[in-house]
Amino acid sequence: METPFVYDKYVTGKYFVGRKKECGIMGNLLDAGEHVVLYEPPKTGKMSLIQQTLMNMRSAGKPFVTACVEMFNIRTIEDFLVKFGTTVMKASLSTPDQFKDAIERHLFGTHFIFDRDRFYQDGDIVSMNWAPDRNDIAQMMRLPRRIAADLGVPFYVILREFQAIMFSDDYEDVLKELEIAFAEKNEGPAAPFIMTGSQVNAMKFIFAERKFFYRQVVHLPLAPIDDRELIEHIVRGFLYGQGKSFERNLAMGACELFKSNIWYLNHLAAVCDSMSKGFINEGIMVDALNSMLALHQPRFMNMVNDLTDHQLSLMKAILDGVVKFSASDVIEKYHLNSSANVRRVKDALRKKEIITFNEKDEPVILDPLFEYWITKYYFERQ
């Protein structure tokens, strides 16, 4: 049954809520051939924004080709290059002869080959006959631009969960060769990259701390979706989807609880929808929230079980609204030992992707439902 509350995949069209400004900015950047980077917590709408932007561009009659390289399971440079080349070619070409020709022309002088047996068995268009070197990386990073020139249209390459490249040995070789490719002047159709990541601190390490791609990519931050749009989305979804009633004050409370996270809101609304026949009251919403907590609690328990006493103490301080952790009274109150220890604890929580720090150096807990759970159920605060 069709539901207005989609949370199991990215959304476009009538299911896409808010972020018209970001769609316009991204569309303009891609039109100009600019590379874009998005790093936000999981399930905050990165892929929905990208796909809605591309849909808007198609509706405007703009021709282009796009490929999405899923990088979450990348562990070696060879894995990345094979998947990158295969995904790019599948998105733009269609026959084995075309694949073979493209590899021979665009990847000449490299260790890349087209193995028909492997293609028919595993679907890999690109294979390697030797361990990859810097030249292999350099030529592969230029493949989308060369295919764009063949086709005569722009080629947009999405690198999803880009921070996973750091699992690979010598991952910096990829970043450096990509920087060189980005710096080259392009005479033909553009081939901009869209690099996304849900591990916020890992992406910040690449782009903000190490400053790879400095002035070569545009970071597009996602502002919270306006609560009024979210409330309207929820109320309208119940009314026009199943003719059900959902009070606006309940929708407002849900927005506050989930800090305007559209994925959690859609999940909550979908559970409420499945539990009700007509009017959704506070009791139904509480039951739906408890169902969600039951689903996520094992993950949350694993997260806190992985924390040291000092890390839990810092979490408690964050929940208390503390922002200056190295102050002597804070160190004493939360038993944090020293300012040097505070730095180590902050770094550990960042690496575990539990917190990040905003432009004002204020702590932000990345998962709003985890924040609610650890407050109410772990620290047992009301």
Image (tube, grey):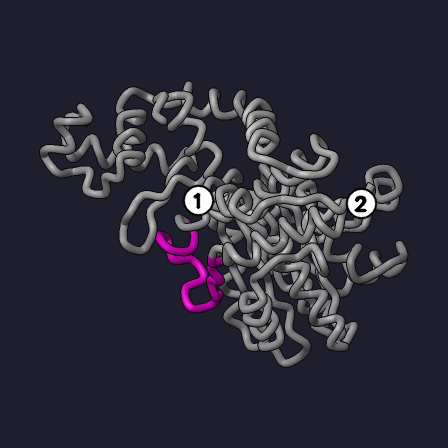
Residue 126 painted magenta: no
Quarter occupied by the C terminus: top left
Please indicate whether residue 205 sits to the left or right of residue 337 in the image: right
**Residue corresponding to mark 2:** 2
**Residue corresponding to mark 1:** 202
Residue 208 painted magenta: yes
Please indicate whether residue 226 sits to the left or right of residue 128 in the image: left
**Closer to the camera, 283 or 348?**
283
For badge 1, the amino acid type reads: Ala
Helix, strand or loop at label 2? It is: loop
Q: Residue at x 86, y 37 (%)?
A: 121
> Can you name the residue that lies furthest to the bottom here?
187
Q: Is residue 288 above or below residue 174?
A: above
Where is residue 180? Give x, y as percent: 51, 65
Where is residue 360? Give x, y as percent: 27, 54
Please indicate whether residue 112 sits to the left or right of residue 179 in the image: right
How dense is the environment of label 1, judged by Cα within 10 Å: few (below 14), some, or many (20 and up)? many
Quarter occupied by the N terminus: top right
**Which residues are the magenta region?**
206-223
**Closer to the camera, 55 or 271?**
271
Helix, strand or loop at label 1? It is: helix
